[in-house]
Amino acid sequence: MKHEICKIADIPQTGSLIAPFFGREVHVYRCGERIRAAANVCLHFGGPLDCKDGRLVCQWHGAAFDMASGDRLDGPAPKNSRLMFLSTRVENGALNYVWGE
Ligand code: FES
C-alpha cells in the first residue's frame, strides 16, 4: 500500500520540506541522488526538529541528528538513537510512503 507524501518538484535542493503525515509531520530532503523522509520527532522526548546546517536539531533541548544516516550527533537523545525514516518510493513525480509490500 502507499500514501503520497509530496511532489518531488516541491522538495528543495537544500534544506527540507516539512510535509503532513497522518496528523503528524515528516522532514523530506535530498541526500545526493536519494530522497529521505524522517519523522519530525526527536528521539529524546519527541520534540520538533529544525533543519540546520545539514543536521536536524531539536527545538526543545538541542539534540542533533545527521540527516543522511539519521545518527544522533549531539545532545540528550540516547547515544545509539537514530531518526525514524519512512520507507518510500518515487512514482509518477511523487514521493510515496509504502508499507506492507
Ligand atoms: S526532546 Fe529533543 S532534545 Fe529533548
Image (cartoon, helix red, strand yellow):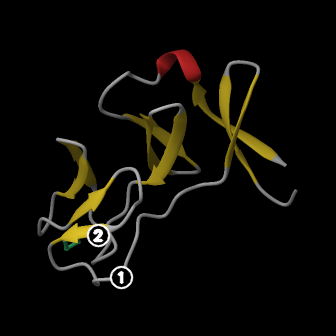
Mark 1 crowd level (few <14, some 14–19, many ≥20, 10 Å Cα)? few
Give the residue at mark 1: 80
Residue shown at 84% from the left, 61% from the top: 100
Query: Which element carries disc 1, helix, strand or loop?
Result: loop
Residue 92 lies, with reference to residue 23, above or below; the image says above
Residue at the (12%, 65%) spot, across then down:
62
Distance from disc 1 to disc 2, alpha carbons, whole Å, reads 7 Å
Q: Amino acid at mark 2?
A: Arg
Badge 2, how many Cα within 10 Å: few under 14, some, many 20+?
A: many
Q: Is residue 8 left or right of residue 43?
A: right
- Which mark is first along the chain, 2 or 1? 2
- Mark 1 touches mark 2? (CB < 8 Å): yes
Is label 2 in a helix, a strand or a loop?
A: strand
Dividing the image into four quarters, tell me where ligand 1 lies. bottom left
> Where does the image place residue 56, in percent across and percent down from the top left?
26, 52
Above or below, 79 relative to 57: below
- At x 30%, y 57%, the residue is 66
On screen, residue 82 versus residue 50, left or right, reads right
Q: Which residue is mark 2?
A: 72
Question: What's the amino acid at mark 1?
Answer: Asn
